[in-house]
Amino acid sequence: MDTFHSPRPWYQRLAALPGRWIVDREIILRSDHSTKLLRVSRRFQFIALGVWAVTTGWLSFASTSYFEINRVLDTRTAALDQAHDAYRDLLNQMANHQLAVMAITRDLESKQGPLRRLFDQNENLRADLKVTETQRRQSEAERTKVAQTRQAVAEKMSELEQTVRSMWGENGSLEKHISGLRGQLASIEAEKEEIAAQRSAMSRRMSQLQNELKVSLARTAQVEAQLDSTRNDLQLASHQRDRMQEDGQISQVRVRDLEARITEIQRVHREVMIKLNDRTRADIAEVQKIVSRTGLNLDTLLPKDPPAPRAGAAKLGGQGGPFVPLFRDVAPSSDATTNLDAMSFSLGTQLRRLDKIHGVLRSIPLFPPLDSFTLMSGFGARSDPFLGQAAMHYGLDLSAPMRTPVMSTAPGTVVVAGWRSRYGRMVEIDHGNGLRTRYGHLYKINVRRGQKVDFRETIGLLGSSGRSTGPHVHYEVLINGEPTDPNKFLRAGKDVFKG
């Protein structure tokens, strides 16, 4: 029996449309070294659609309200403009009335002005007459006072002239008396200066005589002391002469004994020097052999000695002496002292070279950055872990647990401490002599750029930052900027540890 399905109503079909359009979607985000998958669910899309609908409705309502409010404001603004125009007309009418009133007031003021001026002139004339009368009376009184004052001044002037004449006479007598006193004072001062000069000369002479007396007494005492010392020295010299004659024979025996001992010491010393020379040359050869395994040229790493003076340079001194072979395989000289000096010079040269070699050896990264690790990828060609294509690997991938301490493989200076795109968190250390090491994919960096680090000092924690598939440290060794297989250095380091 066939089943008949009636068509659905239009509103059900309309409600089903969003379900057909809105489905679960996946967005793929791809970068240079990684690929991410972003999943967008139907619920999130419905929520976003609802937010968009509410925002659109609110914007529509706000726009409509804004236009309606603007229309009402325009109507009210037009009404206010009409009211302003009416108010302006009233102000103009009031201004016209005020102008008319002011014109009438000015007319009245112009008629009252002449009457006021005539009245004021009359009053001024009366006041001037009173002032003039008063001034006339005052001037007559002042004339009388001036005449009296002139008479009194004339009498006072005559009295002053008589007083001045008498004072001039007294001044002349006083000046004569003062000049006499000045002459007496000058003679007294000259006598005092002469007496003072004589006293100073006498005191200097007395002090000179006292000093001469002291010197004479000191010399006498010194001569007496020298005489006593000379007598004692003569007695002591006679005793020493007798004693030296007795000790002469004993000294000869001792000298022969010392010569025999010196000969034996020179022989032992020569044997020790030979052994030290051999041991030093063996140590140098062993270290050179270890360094050569790393691919480094030891002669280029050693610090250079200061250059010898040029032939044309000014010579401040000279050099010379007999030729003495440096090594012991040359026939020994008949002079034992010269032979020992040659061996001492040879040993010193070898020890200085060995010290320089040890200094270079300490700056070479011969040990791994981890105490224990698993080698995941070596130096050279390999398959890229991300792309699966053939690629070149310029270091070693050493795996260990997350946050394992990563240590510097030799002392040096930190030149890089930060994020590098391919290495993640990376530290690069300059060990000198063109040697550098890199430590990549760290979880944390414990040093900063420019910091001095020692051998086996913790510089960071092992991690998986940057282009990495898991926790490990990417370890590189560079010579003058060129990557080198770190395994060479690690194998040489094992030989150093054995030695």
Image (tube, grey):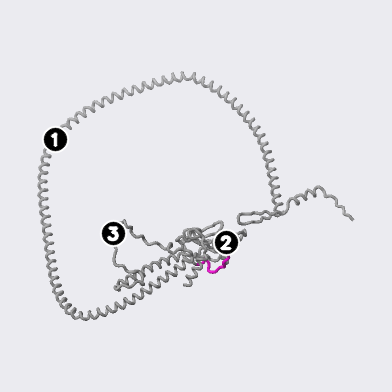
Which image quarter: residue 319? Answer: bottom left
Magenta region includes residue 425: no
Q: Position of residue 109 (x, y in %)?
A: 50, 21
Amino acid type at mark 2: Ala
- Give SS at disc 2: strand
Counting residues from the start of the chain, the first of labels 3 and 1 encountered is 1
The residue where tag 1 is placed is 168
256 and 226: which is toward the camera: 256
Q: Position of residue 333 (x, y in %)?
A: 31, 72
In the displayed orientation, state which residue is furthest to the right.
Answer: 1
The residue where tag 3 is placed is 316
Which image quarter: residue 153? Answer: top left
Question: Is there a contact, CB below 8 Å, between mark 2 and mark 1?
Answer: no
Measured Cα–Cα span from mark 2 to mark 3: 61 Å
The residue where tag 2 is placed is 381
Magenta highlight: main SS = loop
Magenta span covers which residues?
A: 367-376
Question: Mark 1 Cα within 10 Å, few/some/many (few <14, many 20+)?
Answer: few
Magenta region includes residue 372: yes
Seen in the picture, residue 26 relative to 173 is either above or below; the reply is below
Residue 110 horizontal side relative to residue 162, left or right: right
